[in-house]
Structure formats: structure tokens, C-alpha cells
Amino acid sequence: MEIIIQSDSKEGDKVAARMIAGLIRRKPDAVLGLATGSTPLGLYRELVRMHREEGLDFSGVTSFNLDEYIGLATDHPQSYHRFMFENLFNHINMATDRIHVPDGMTADVPAFCADYEQSIRAAGGIDLQVLGIGTDGHVGFNEPSSSLASRTRIKTLTQQTLSDNARHFADPSGQPHHVITMGIGTIMESRQVVMLAFGANKADAVARSVEGPVCAMMPASVLQFHPRAHVILDDASAARLSKADYYRWVYDNKPAWQQH
Ligand code: GLP
């Protein structure tokens, strides 16, 4: 794992955006795995800025989103579909038919999930997967106890995740308990993973994922097995890492040929 600790989330967003922009410039038909939540908002703003000011071209890019709430239509204010269009897709030049977000209204969840996996394979697999992390260590919506080999499927949210995300729902009774999420096995097949975590409320999950044992009760810890996982943190989310000074030194002294 590469642990990248920046002074604040803005600097972290820039590091992540540079990695994605570098990939798209090297491989214009790159396949991105994308995440929602408040964490990647700054990254998406930076990518939009790069598109507008630096001509970063998304026309050949394909994307697959991690997850979606079951029962929310694409235009529901809290659907991840709408989130992605409002915060990224409406502001860059991605072709609509290359954008994939799980369908929360599907009548046949297992069939939809199998198709989603097949579409990822047909696109050549995910080159770079963006991840946030839940306070309980979930990635996508793979809650604690998720199989570390799981594929895209239905999951039930924990009380902790429901509480964390309740702030987004004006009427809590309308907050779905069920979701479709890429599995941990699906995420682990992406060629590169960039996990972002900012703020003190993520410090515990980050420390347990990066320095604790690999365990289904802390799903993000599985990234320790990924050959190319980058974890981008700010000082607050890195506060409980025992080797933070070492990670800082390593990053600050990377050989030029190894720079992103
Ligand atoms: C949500 C999403 C995750 C996200 C996480 C953290 O429930 N399904 O993909 O990483 O929770 O959210 P936030 O970034 O708002 O802290």
C-alpha cells in the first residue's frame, strides 16, 4: 500500500486527480470505477477544472459506479445516479452510453448484478477504482462481515451507516436499508485502487484498515492484498497511524521515476 498523507483534503484531491488525469492521458479509453459520498466531491471538482482549463478529455472514458440505493429512481435527489451527474458527468465530456451506475429500480436484482459484472468484464476490467471509506470500514456498501471474495449483489446497511448517511435524507423514513454494491472481489480486480479518507471521524477506520489485521469486519483492510493500492489521507484521518512519519518520508522522497 502507498500511504499518501497531505496537509488537507484539497491537497489530497489534487494528488488523486493527477493520478486519474495521468491514466486518462496514457490510456484515453480508460475504465474508471467511481465512488459517491462527500469524500470524492473535491476530487470531482478538480477533474471538472482539469477538463475545463487543461482540456482533460473524457470522451473515450468508461465508468462504473460502486453502488446505488435500492428503490431510488435515477432522478431521486439522494440517488447516486443523480449525485454523479450533478457532481461530475454533467460537467465533463463523457459519453452517456459509457456511464454505468447500478439500477436501484431493477425488478430483478440478481440478474442485474450478474449483468453489471459482465459489463465490467466486457469493458476490459476497471483500470482505476476510486474509493471512500465508511466509519465502520465499508468500501462501496460492503459492510462489515461482507465476504472478501464477494461480487456485485444486494446488501443491507448497518445501523452505523444508516446514521452516518441520514443527514442526506430530509425524511429518514425514506432512507433505503438495501443497496446494490460491487463486491469486494470485484473491487480487488481493478488494476489500481485509490482510496480517499479525510477528517478525524475516519481516523479509526483508516488505522484499522492500513495497520490492522485483514478482516471481513474491517472491509477496507483487504486492500492490504491489492498490488497497487494508494490511500490518500489528510493529517486528521492519518492521526492514528503508528507509522505516519515513515509514510510521509517515503512519499516525500520518492524517486523521480516513481512519481505519479
Ligand atoms: C457511503 C458510500 C461509500 C462512501 C462512504 C463514506 O455510504 N456508499 O462509497 O465511501 O459511505 O461516505 P462519506 O464520503 O460521505 O464519508
Image (spheres, rainbow, N blue to C red):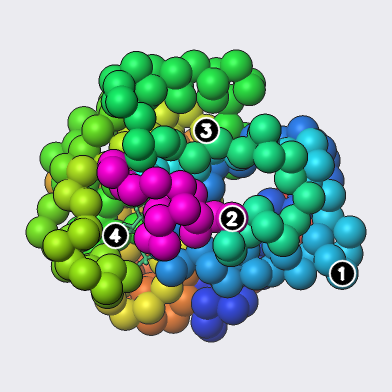
Q: Are discs 2 and 3 less than 8 Å apart at CB?
A: no
> Does the segment drawn in magenta span residue 78?
yes
Q: Quadrant of residue 199?
A: bottom left
Q: Earlier in the sequence, mark 4 or mark 2?
A: 2
Q: Amino acid at mark 3?
A: Ser
- What residue did someone put label 3 on? 190
Distance CA(mark 2)–CA(mark 3) = 23 Å
- In reply to whether residue 227 is colored magenta, the answer given is no
- Earlier in the chain: of badge 2 and badge 3, it is 2
Q: Residues within 10 Å of mark 4 (few under 14, many from 20)?
A: many
- How much space separates mark 1 and mark 2, taking CA atoms? 20 Å
Helix, strand or loop at disc 3? loop
Specify start and end residues of the magenta stretch as a single range: 69-85
Kindly identify the amino acid type of the residue bearing the numbered disc 2: Phe
According to the image, label 1 marks what residue? 53
Ligand 1: does it lie within 8 Å of the C-beta at label 4?
A: yes
* Discs 3/4, front: 4
**Foreground: 49 or 196?**
49
Q: Which residue is mark 4?
A: 134
Query: What residue is pinned by disc 2?
Result: 85
Q: Which image quarter holds the C terminus? A: bottom right
